[in-house]
Image (spheres, helix red, strand yellow):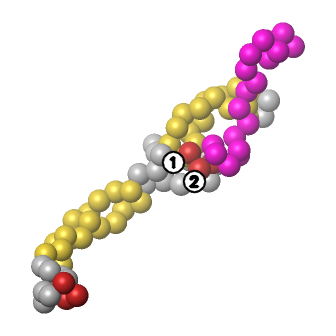
Amino acid sequence: MARQCDYCGKRTEVGNQVTHRGLPKKKGGIGLRCTGRTKREFKPNIQRVAAVVGGQLTRVKVCTRCLKAGKVAKPARGKLATAG
């Protein structure tokens, strides 16, 4: 899929943006009223990173939560990685 994490399956979700009008009751008004609902999308933070999958270096789409959790095996970098 286009915007989906390869590890946890997180993808775009839909919801509503709710517009309110009025003054809250605790501030002396008659309360807030809903004046409209518009569809919107919640998009995950997907990154394309180089990862080691099955012993081979491939590019995968991963959400930042999986990156921070260490679920992705990234390749070794530096002089020691190329010497060995």
Identify the residue at image location x=53%, y=54%. 10
Q: Amino acid at mark 1?
A: Gln
* Residue 50 at x, y percent in the picture: 63, 29
| Image: 64 above or below 35 | above
* Residue 24 at x, y percent in the picture: 19, 83
Identify the residue at image location x=73%, y=20%. 77
User: Image quarter for residue 52?
Assistant: top right
Q: Are marks 1 and 2 in contact (CB under 8 Å)?
A: yes
Residue found at the very far front of the displayed protein? 27
* Residue 53 at x, y percent in the picture: 73, 35
User: 53 or 42, which is in the foreground?
Assistant: 42
* Residue 11 at x, y percent in the picture: 48, 53
User: 18 or 13, which is in the foreground?
Assistant: 18
Residue 76: tell me if it is visible.
yes
Q: Residues within 10 Å of mark 1 (few under 14, many from 20)?
A: some
Left or right? Give the position of 67 relative to 4: right
Q: Amino acid at mark 2?
A: Gly
Q: Which residue is mark 2?
A: 9
Q: Which residue is mark 1?
A: 4
**Secondary element at tag 2:** loop
Left or right? Give the position of 43 relative to 70: left
- Real-space Cα separation, disc 1 to disc 2, in angstroms: 6 Å
For marks 1 and 2, the one nearer the N-term is 1
Q: Give the number of the disc on residue 63.
A: none
**Secondary element at tag 1:** loop
The magenta segment is 67-84
